[in-house]
Image: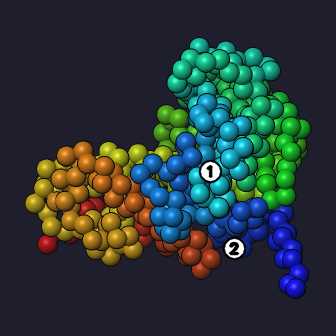
Amino acid sequence: MTAPTEPAAVPAFGFRLIATDGMARRGEVTTAHGAIRTPAFMPVGTQATVKTMYPEQVRALGADILLGNTYHLMLRPTAERVDRLGGLHRFMNWPHPILTDSGGFQVMSLAKLRKLNEQAVTFQSHIDGSRHVLSPERSLEIQGLLGSDIQMQLDECVALPAERAEIERAMRLSLRWAERSKAAFFGKPGHGLFAIVQGGDDEALRVESARALTAIGFHGYAVGGLAVGEPQDVMLRILSATTPELPADRPRYLMGVGTPDDIVESVGRGIDMFDCVMPTRAGRHGQAFTRRGKVNLRNARHADDPRPIDEESTCPAARDYSRAYLHHLVKAEEALGAMLLTWINLSYYQDLMAGLRAAIEAGRFQDHKAAVKDGWARGDLPAL
């Protein structure tokens, strides 16, 4: 008789720094559902789906982790239902790491008739007008029901530009909510809680926020409230002031960023993790990201172009379909056009991250950054 197999032990949540090159870092995050190679780009699966993509496709492109959204999932299908159905990993057929945001940004940007006080934010659903209360404790409860590997504290994100007094008020509220979030976090093995540095475009407030959150102690640290309307130079200035204040032995996540150029520059300032809707949204609107920059397939000049998007790409959608065909699909509003272009874009983003990881390990980050930017500067691929 065969002895029963012991269940595999769940590894502790952790971060291992593998190599550095200047401020750029190559690392690995350990979670209950697998490892995350950093620098990492997390495709956004807002409502438990990366739009127009199968989970198996996303994994095959090299993604180690997806992002889910607390606000959307608490409203539909509800966290309680997802929990009854076995958790978010099983629900969306993604047995790999998942990060869920706290829902705070969406409450501020999408919800109707919201009211914020010290205890929580009360809002009406943008779907059916139903009333909900989201507190730091409730956000962590929802994320726990979803079963995500990385959970985020609830914070208040202020759109820029804003008055310093308003930025400081929101930063201090976010610090108090961070303390409550840590107290409410029920960490199962392999699951972690990230704090969120706030402070708008004020370097002193950012440094104060980072130091205070470090003193509280979290599994990782995110930089929030950027990519909300400020110029890139402001974002990079804030990162340069903030990341040196964060623990070197914990992962750093820049929320909602961004363009390939934003990512490359931010990696050079010590950021490990990124998410953004840009590659999927651009694909649904006829745009493709390539090693020579962005291509707009809506342009009439592609109508008779037999070339692929990039004959050297590792992605079949970029290599095996003509620009003329992709242009036709976009103009005809065929779903296949969005599917193929999203595939191309997510492939490009994952290839970009793989190249950055290899360059940092080899001590060639600055040379690789220059080569990537030179490719963008040269523009569209040469004509036949």
In the rendered image, the vertical position of residue 175 relative to residue 162, given as above or below: below
Say few, some or many: other residues with alpha carbon within 10 Å of mark 1 (under 14 / 14 to 19 / 20 or more): some
Closer mark to the observer between disc 2 and disc 1: 1
- Image position of 154 (left or right of 162): right
The kind of residue on which mark 1 rests is Phe
Which one is nearer the viewer's eye here, 263 or 118? 118
Say few, some or many: other residues with alpha carbon within 10 Å of mark 2 (under 14 / 14 to 19 / 20 or more): some
Q: Residue furthest front?
A: 1
Q: Which mark is residue 5?
A: none
Position of the N terminus, as image quadrant, is bottom right
Which one is nearer the viewer's eye here, 150 or 170? 150
Q: Secondary structure at mark 1?
A: helix
Q: Secondary structure at mark 2?
A: strand
Q: Which mark is residue 91?
A: 1
Find residue 336 and report its horizontal and vertical position in percent. Answer: 30, 54
Residue at 30% over, 71% down: 319
Answer with the quarter of the image where residue 38 lies: bottom right
Answer with the quarter of the image where residue 138 lies: top right
> How many labels, in total?
2
Q: Which residue is mark 2?
A: 19
- Image position of 19 (left or right of 59): right
- Image position of 235 (left or right of 198): left
Find residue 335 and report its horizontal and vertical position in percent. Answer: 31, 49
